[in-house]
Amino acid sequence: MATTAMPVASAVLGADRRWLFRAALYTAAGLGYAVIGAPILFVSWLSFFSNEIVSFPPQGYTLRWFPHILDQNNFVSGFATSFQVGVVAMLGGLLLGVPASLVLARRRFLGREALNTLLILPLVVPGVVAGTSIYVFQVEAELLTGLPLLGSVAGLVLAHVMITIPWTVRLVAASLAGFDRSIEEAALNLGATPLKTFLKVTLPVIRPGVVAAALFGFIVSFGNLEMTLFLVAPGVTTLPIAILQYLQWRIDPTIAAVSFLQILLIGAGMLLTDRYVKLTRVL
Amino acid sequence: MSKTTFRISRRRLVQVTGAAAGMAALGPFGRARAQAAGKVVVGTWGGDYSKLLSKNIDTPLLAPKNYEVVHDIGGDPERRAKMRAEARLPRGTSDVQGLSAAQMFEMSAAELTLPVDYAKIPNAKNLVPQMKYPYGIGHIYSGKVILYNPKLVSAPTSFADCLDPKHGAKLGIIDIQYQFTMMAAGIASGGSMTNYDPGKERLLACKKAGAKIYPTNEALAAALKNEEIALCIMWKARAVQWQKAGINVETVAPKEGVPLYISGFVIPKNAPNKDGAHAWLNAMLEPSAQEAFAEDMGYNPTVTNAKVPAETQKRIGFNADEQKRLVDLDYGYLAQNDAALKEWWDKVFKG
């Protein structure tokens, strides 16, 4: 009796376990989505509140905070600067990061691991520490060379290139995993130059990684606050700094409206990119 | 019926993205650095502060004199860090820096500021004496007062009344102003401007009774608005701003004294345009600029010839009796003890 009852009991237990597993999975996924989605949802909701001091429940709804953004020159110029710096940093990050990933993925040399760690470091070092260090470095470089390096936009852009590199290296390296090098060899055997081989064979294969790296490089640069605080030149401000500074004197939902537009912009960028390159393939 | 679809080819997307990137790369990344040729770089907080400096000082008063004023926008911690870091440079990146009185003292003690040449600032003759420092000038001021919701609590008269455990969870305390909170508790408990220690016991008792600690001004304002708390201590200028935003609070100038909050400007020792810096400070003290700040931000002018409308004065200012109780801080004590105060606040009070 016991031997025949066992499989039945086990099957029942198995079904129970599967059900429990599924319930736990859905709960965890739901919680994950809630944690990610709640701030986005709340910021978007807040941007339509009519009350100047944010409190719940809202006293009413309005669109007036959106035109108010344009009254604040720092938001407009901050957006332009963040956009420009973001694009240049993204391009710089790709120019340096893609070759670095190729070398790291394909060559074995002394110090490879150290180089790999070095390229990830900007992710590990806190932004405030990085910003202060770069500022002090610029001071020392200016003392040494006599060149007016401090407070230059070039310094800001170079620092932003630095923070995009870990993303480029990781994402491109991920897309290089499992890459069949025999197709590159075939192209080379058939007379293609190494550059042509890279452009016509390698690049199309790693394209999802490159596009994702470009997108994330831009987002990381566009949203950077801590490091940028120390590096903005006089007369230049970025959007995150403009938001932080606005908050020092006013607490109305204008900053929620700015953030809402930023969410829309970045969301649109991601959707548009995903239409051409499936981001889920590399992320 | 024709169906219109909007399609962008991959090649086209790359072209458009590339063009945008190119435009961004070649964009007008202007380099602004303080220069002797009429450019004045002003280190300042952003938001309304920077906007009002432009509107009331730079554009109407300096531009006609061919000065180009550029703002170096940032919070005071990073601007002070930058002042320290670039101290060894013969030419710094800013000509004037906006700081609180305590921070002006700190920068001066670190020998990072240039003594103000008052002979170059004719408007300084109208300065309220407390606002005239050898190393900097007060731009605007307010005082630490008690804010209370008349619907929820009867009017307190003193810091001792406000920072009292009897209020339980109705008392709100702001984290970022730990120095002023400790000072207020100190003078409410027999301490002085050079000894905040007697207030520690009072603060601990308040916390034990349920007083709530808020990280930022916004959080404190929201708590007052929601009636989560009924009273707190805060700058009178903030109270004016919050009243305008519809929060039901009244203010009381505490009888122990009204500690001053002064926001001012110093000239870094290596300012490239020292004459421009003095010209800017002189313009800052013009009555028109001072009156505009009072009206727009709720802070008091630091010159005696500014004419603030009576109604505004009533909201933001202090009457004759209250003015007698305005007390400046001992910045030397604060600079010497700040690390210890912060440690107590973080580890004992909040911990």
Image: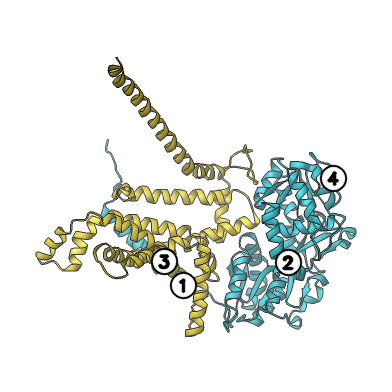
Chain colours: A yellow, B cyan
Image coordinates for residue A114, horizontal then vertical, percent: 35, 67
| Residues at marks 3 and 1 on the same chain | yes
Residue behind mark 1? A155
Q: Identify residue type, mark 4.
A: Ala
Q: Nearer the viewer, mark 4 or mark 2?
A: 2
Q: Is residue B2 visible to us here?
A: yes
Farthest residue to the top: give it: A1
- Res A162 label: 3
Instruction: State if disc 1 and disc 4 touch (CB < 8 Å).
Output: no
Query: Which secondary structure, mark 3?
Result: helix
Q: Nearer the viewer, residue A103 or A164?
A: A103
User: Tag 1, which chain?
Assistant: A
- Res B155 label: 4
Relative vertical location of residue B195 with respect to residue B225 in this rendering, above or below: below
Relative vertical location of residue B196 with respect to residue B65 in this rendering, above or below: above
Image coordinates for residue A119, horizontal then vertical, percent: 37, 65
Q: Give the Cα distance between marks 3 and 2.
A: 39 Å
Left or right of B234, for residue A196: left
